[in-house]
Amino acid sequence: MITMACHCTGCQRMTSSAFSLSSLFSSTDLSITSGEPVIGGLRGTTHHFFCGHCMSWFFTRP
């Protein structure tokens, strides 16, 4: 649907960078083929999912 670059301090912390690059698309278009993501960075109803092995930010569900 869209792509974006976010420079907020939350995204800077999660990516260890000056910004994060993100794409917005329907959750039906995403499939996890291996492993199970872990939830972290809870903020209200927003859940950030991370790789359980390396803890890299994988996706967010509002």
Image (tube, grey):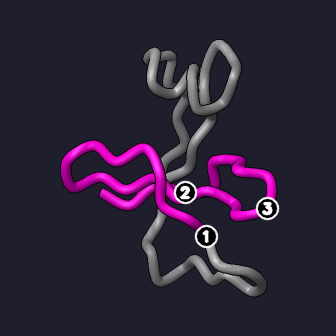
Q: Earlier in the sequence, mark 2 or mark 3?
A: 3
| Residue 26 % position (x, y) | 43, 72
In the rendered image, residue 53 lying in the magenta stretch gets the answer yes
Badge 2 vs badge 1, beta-carbon distance below 8 Å: yes
Position above or below: 21 against 39: above
The Cα atoms of the two marked residues, 2 and 1, are separated by 9 Å
Image depth: mark 2 or mark 3 in front = 3
* Range shown magenta: 38-62
Position above or below: 43 against 20: below
| Residue 58 % position (x, y) | 63, 56
Give amino acid for label 3: His
The one nearer the camera, 59 or 2, is 59
| Residue 57 % position (x, y) | 63, 48
Badge 2 vs badge 3, beta-carbon distance below 8 Å: no
For label 1, the crowd category at 10 Å Cα-Cα, with few meaning under 14, some 14 to 19 and many 20 or more, is some
Q: Earlier in the sequence, mark 2 or mark 1?
A: 1
The numbered mark at residue 48 is none
The numbered mark at residue 37 is 1
The numbered mark at residue 53 is 3
Circle 2 residue: 59
Q: Magenta: predominant secondary structure element?
A: strand
